[in-house]
Image (tube, helix red, strand yellow):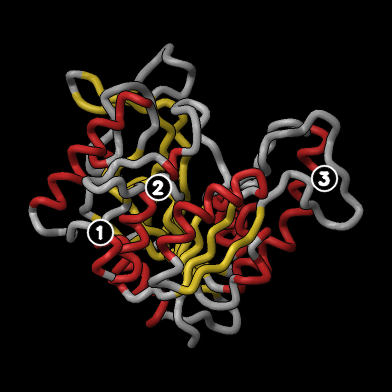
Amino acid sequence: MKRPILAVLAAGMGSRYGGLKQMDPVGPNGEFIIDFSIFDAHRAGFDTVVFIIKHEIEEAFKETVGARVEKYMNVRYAFQQVDMLPEGYTLPEGRVKPWGTGHAVLCAADVLDAPFAVINADDYYGPEAFQSAYDFLTTVEDEPNKCHYAMVGYQLKNTVTDHGSVARGVCQTDAEGNLVAVVENTQIETYPGGIRTSMDGGKTWADLDPDTLVSMNLWCFRPSFVEELIREFPAFLDKTMVENPLKGEFFLPLTVTEMLQKDIADIKVLPSHDKWYGVTYHEDRPTVVAALQEKTDSGLYPSPLMESL
């Protein structure tokens, strides 16, 4: 089995936060959030990273993130551009929005030649998640008629913010801890009584168990998953070109769900007790800065971070 690859989704810009979040210094020595993920992944065993970016940010990204990471890991790049479509398809007039996380992984198909984990560039996942992902990818293999993948699940209470609502994929699992479905909740927020969700724009609310497992887009796949993306993307485009040509997105959970329904894959949910951090809103930044400082002060991370790899 080839050694696993870390695939980093870094093409997007934070519309609510403003600017390239993955290039915002938040660590004690000016580290980016992605630096902590790279550190944790490397410590878990990953030695190759694929950054999936846009050509528009290529120079800035390579000069900042890439330059420091390539000293310690094998670095590959893939580019997600909105006009990268299968033969026979053309970009809808006026389309500028990226095609989603599934399309991003598709754009890296040529360099994802081993088992791989997928993460967002601007999220802090914690060391437990990367160790679980690496252990899974190095011990579990596909079978002839069944693909075996995994997803790291976080307790909802460890992923919410006090500064607004968030969207989370709520995980439904069976008795063996395998994923049955991911139910997208687009409006989840904290309130004095706990955590609640609304599916109708805030007209009605329902409480959610704070320990509910949610997806934060940390997946463990194999090249077989890329093959399935290649098969599924044209069908997605056929439908989206008619129904929502300017904004429709090809998300990773869409293909995951299709494979589950066809019973050609199972997804093991790997629970993490780490607290997830991200800068969903500008007001979240001080919390992230303080948390990373505390983790460094406690000895979880060395200072400076990357120089110790």
Q: Is residue 262 left or right of residue 18?
A: right
Residue beneath the point at 30% across and 45% down? 30
- Identified by mark 1, the residue type is Leu
User: Which image quarter holds the C terminus?
Assistant: bottom left
Mark 1 lies on a secondary structure that is loop
Q: In the image, residue 120 lies at what x, y percent?
A: 46, 50
Q: Which residue is mark 2?
A: 216
Residue matched to label 3: 238
Q: Position of residue 104 (x, y in %)?
A: 62, 53
Amino acid type, residue under disc 3 in the picture: Asp
Q: Which residue is mark 1?
A: 305
Task: Report x, y in % for residue 249.
Answer: 65, 41
Residue 263, picture quadrant: bottom right
Horizontal side of 287 relative to 135 (left or right) equals left
Above or below, 121 relative to 129: above
Give the vertical position of 145 relative to 58 (above or below).
Answer: below
Of 277 and 245, nearer the camera is: 277
How many numbered circles are shown? 3
- Whole-percent x, y for residue 214 in the image: 36, 45
Q: Is residue 276 rendered to the left or right of residue 85? A: left
- Name the residue rendered at 46%, 47% in the picture: 182
Q: Report crowding for label 1: few under 14, some 14 to 19, many 20 or more residues within 10 A (C-alpha).
A: some
Q: Nearer the viewer, residue 14 or 188?
A: 14
Occupied quadrant, residue 272: bottom left
